[in-house]
Amino acid sequence: MSSRPASLWYAFHQVPGQPGHVVVGVASDEFADGTVVQLPPPVRRPSGWTTEVHVPGPGRFPERVIVADRLSPGAPLLWYVVLPTPDTASDVDLIAFSTDHRADGDVLDAAGFAALGIDWGNQVGALRWDAASGLARQVYVAPALRRRGVGTKLGGAAVAFARTSGWATVQLDGRRTDLGEAWLSAVRDRSWIRLPERTSSAPPMTPPTEAAGVPDRNLRPDPATPAG
């Protein structure tokens, strides 16, 4: 597992001949944390890039968020739907799908999703957070797709989406499920997230009534390896 780099900074460039722009997150010590630099042409992804966000124009939400393969090796194709939640004025859901209806990284709103004519039951993950504070309230991955990098890829996309939208940085608190703690402990590159120490335990996200047919390793952490 690699330690988190000192800085997560951002490289910005305009899209030639278009009103949009691209923001690339970069994990390196070249600039201070949070710094935004404008890249001159010809534009290339800097070494250490983590995410690439495509914004179609001023004041608009991102339309595509690409997560570097090295953050979640082997993760499946994911595209996303972003929604405000009914719970509070500032809560946001980023919901992941893994069908061939859209390209990897595409981001839709509710109307764009409705136009596809597919069911919400096809989602493979979701991350809910408070856009005002950045606090992640819930991270969920469908049991059948756990341990395939979906949570890491979804988390990286949410962090990049929030940063490019001008919201607070997405971050976790110390309350996590056992499986969530095991997942975060196994993440090899934590450059996309602020991770405090675990302070309390949250109940499992998958109740026994929904666990039928799901491999046990997708519901519980691996048992600890005995010393010696």
Image (cartoon, grey):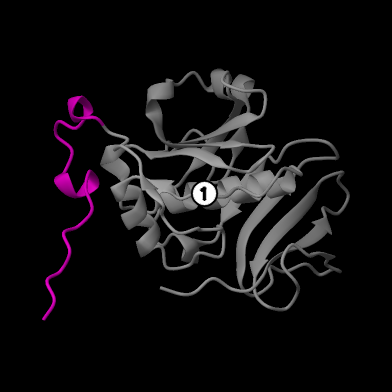
Q: Is residue 143 above or below residue 44?
A: above
Q: Position of residue 178 (x, y in %)?
A: 29, 49
The residue beneath circle 1 is 172
Q: Is residue 204 above or below residue 67?
A: above
Q: Residue at x 41, y 63 (%)?
A: 187
Q: Residue at x 52, y 49 (%)?
A: 172
Which residue is at the front of the view, 15 or 39?
39
Q: Residues within 10 Å of mark 1 (few under 14, many from 20)?
A: many
Question: Residue 3 lies in magenta, yes or no?
Answer: no
For the question of whether residue 76 can be seen, the reply is no
Q: Position of residue 145 (x, y in %)?
A: 31, 43
Q: Position of residue 99 (x, y in %)?
A: 42, 36
Which residue is at the front of the view, 195 or 14?
195
Number of numbered labels in the structure image: 1
- The quadrant of the picture occupied by the C terminus is bottom left
> Label 1's element?
loop
Q: Residue at x 56, y 65 (%)?
A: 191
**Region in magenta:** 207-228
For badge 1, the amino acid type reads: Leu
Question: Residue 218 lies in magenta, yes or no?
Answer: yes
Residue 90 image-quadrant placement: top right
Q: Position of residue 207 (x, y in %)?
A: 24, 30
- The quadrant of the picture occupied by the N terminus is bottom left
Residue 31 image-quadrant placement: bottom right
Which residue is at the front of the view, 51 or 165?
165
Q: Residue at x 56, y 24 (%)?
A: 113
For the question of whether residue 17 can be seen, the reply is yes
